[in-house]
């Protein structure tokens, strides 16, 4: 991998184990030296899990009402 952009392009296939061996090996080698790409791949991997957790949370009624009130105020201007 010469460029970090390639990590973005191959990330899903890499995580799902669908990259051909040469590309997988190059990406793994790049990840061994590029902490920014390691962080990107880890964030990409965890996004669905974090999203499910966030959607499962119930917003407190007071907060929900405060947000609604704020949005009504902003939209009526």
Image (spheres, rainbow, N blue to C red):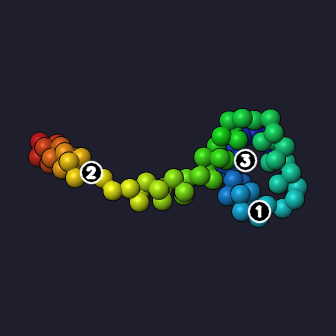
Is the residue 28 above or below the residue 56 in the image?
above
Residue 77, image x, y percentages: 11, 42
Residue 40 location (% of width, % of height) = 64, 43
Task: Give the residue pinned by disc 1.
Answer: 17
Foreground residue, 43 or 10? Answer: 43
At a point 15% along the width and 47% down the height, the residue shown is 69
Q: How far apart in space, not on screen, are marks 2 and 1 (Cα)?
A: 40 Å
Above or below 8: residue 39: above
Q: Nearer the viewer, mark 3 or mark 2?
A: 2
Residue at 87 percent of width and 59 percent of height: 21
Asked where in the image residue 22 lies, by quadrant, the reply is bottom right
Q: Which residue is mark 3?
A: 6
Q: Which mark is residue 48?
A: none
C-beta proximity under 8 Å, tags 3 and 2:
no
Determine the secondary structure under disc 3: helix
Q: Would residue 71 be seen by someone viewing this image from the given angle?
A: no
Q: Quadrant of residue 38?
A: top right
Q: Helix, strand, or loop for circle 2?
A: loop
Secondary structure found at label 1: loop
Q: Which tag, 3 or 2, sits closer to the chain's start?
A: 3
Q: Looking at the image, is mark 2 or mark 1 nearer the viewer?
A: 2
C-alpha gap between disc 3 and disc 2: 42 Å
Q: Which mark is residue 60?
A: 2
Q: Is residue 17 left or right of residue 43?
A: right
Q: Is residue 40 visible?
A: yes
Count of residue discs: 3
- Which x, y percent locates residue 4? 71, 40
Label 1 Cα neighbours within 10 Å, binned few <14 / some 14-19 / many ≥20: few
Q: CA distance from mark 3 to mark 1?
A: 16 Å
Instruction: Please give the name of the residue rendered at 51% of the width and 53% of the height, measured from the top-left corner.
Output: 50
């Amino acid at each position: 991998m010469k460029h970090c952009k390639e990590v973005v392009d191959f990330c899903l296939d890499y995580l799902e184990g669908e990259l051909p061996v040469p590309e997988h090996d190059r990406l793994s080698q790049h990840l061994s030296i590029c902490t920014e790409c390691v962080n990107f791949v880890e964030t990409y991997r965890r996004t669905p899990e974090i999203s499910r957790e966030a959607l499962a949370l119930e917003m407190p009624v007071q907060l929900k009402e405060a947000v609604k009130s704020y949005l009504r105020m902003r939209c009526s201007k």
